[in-house]
Image (cartoon, helix red, strand yellow):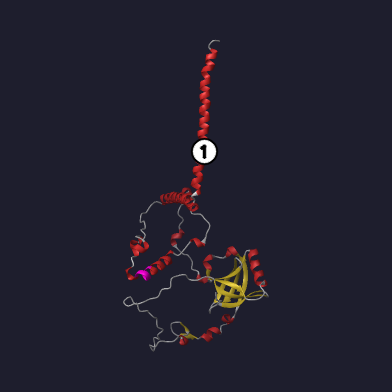
Amino acid sequence: MRAIWTGAITFGLVNVPVKVYSATEDHDVPLHQVHDADGGRIRYQRRCEIDGKIVPYEHIVKAYDDGDKTVILTAEDIASLPAERSREIDVVEFVPNEQLDPLMFDRSYYLEPDSKSLKAYALLRKTLEDEDRTAIVNFALRQKTRLGALRVRGNVLVLQTLLWHDEIREADFPALDSSPRITERELKLSAALMESFAGDFEPEKFSDEYQEELRKLIDAKLEQGESVDTAETFGEEAEGGKKGGGEVIDLMEALQRSVERSRSSRSSGGAEEDDEKPARKTASKSTASKSTSSTSSSKTTAKSTTTRKAPAKKTAKKPA
């Protein structure tokens, strides 16, 4: 990884030099636009609308238009801003972890200690972890003043940029003003359905199916050319797509069906995944069967003995 920024975390008189790295990357297949007739690459030109000439990057600057006037901001103007010149990640406060709304999270960055001494870095990391707190910080990155959350992930400090308060829109939906009546049975069925899907989150279990299929299509076209058969590549569903049900059913019926389907799927899936369980069950049944047969046999023998002895007793009593 290549560091995108260097600076220092500061709180009080403590200074922790760090390097900043992007913690995420885009895995999408890179595509570009071409002319469908001849495959020629489509290029975008930076053409000035006044003189009609193509403008090179070195002569392109930023500007703000208020409707009447245009204010041009050069690279020197931007660099002169005090916040842009700062190389500090300034801790404003330490807050409980649970107080952060995930809706505010934006981009994530790893922080690597940029010093021979790791003590200050390790001390901050350990304190955040032990106190279950997140550091709220201010810093400037890529010509913007940022609000961020500094937290611990494993043995590394992670900096997550946060959206500003006024960047989060209010959820104002009239439909949510009314509260529909929910019955106890609906709630129980909904909870049972949720329980049937319960599990621990394991990110590695999930994959981007669209990108995988796109790569599969590209590989097929590289191998077979334009004559590639998508139905053969992806199966019959490729022609018409997955068929969605348009049937409107009662909520209770939908919950009941879903619970039954999920239970059936789980039970059949479990049997397929574990080949040893059926064997053990069969063995147990066999043992139980033998035990039952043995018990039944003993009972039968006992009954037979009793039956045979009974006439002897009666015969002995008759002469008396």
Q: Which residue is mark 1?
A: 288
Can residue 252 be found in the magenta stretch? no
Residue span colored magenta? 220-224
Q: Nearer the viewer, residue 276 or 112?
A: 276
Judge the density around disc 1: few (<14), some (14-19), many (≥20) Cα neighbours within 10 Å: few
Question: Which image quadrant for residue 131?
Answer: bottom right
Indicate left or right for 107 with 10 as reference. Answer: left
Task: Indicate whether 79 appears above or below 120.
Answer: below
In the figure, 304 relative to 241: above or below?
above
SS at badge 1: helix
Quadrant housing residue 31: bottom left
Image location (x, y in percent) of residue 192: 48, 50
Furthest residue in direction top, as rendered: 319
In front of the other: 247 or 267: 267
What main secondary structure does the magenta stretch of the protein show?
helix
Decide: is 261 above or below 157: above
Residue 89 rendering spot, x and y as whole percentages? 60, 75
Which residue is located at x 52 percent, y 39 percent? 287
Q: Please state the horizontal and vertical placement of residue 38, each as a whole percent of the image.
A: 32, 78
Quadrant assignment for the N terminus: bottom right
| Residue located at (52% from left, 33% from top) | 294
| x then y, percent, for residue 268 | 45, 49
Task: Give the amino acid type for the residue marked by disc 1 in the picture.
Answer: Ala
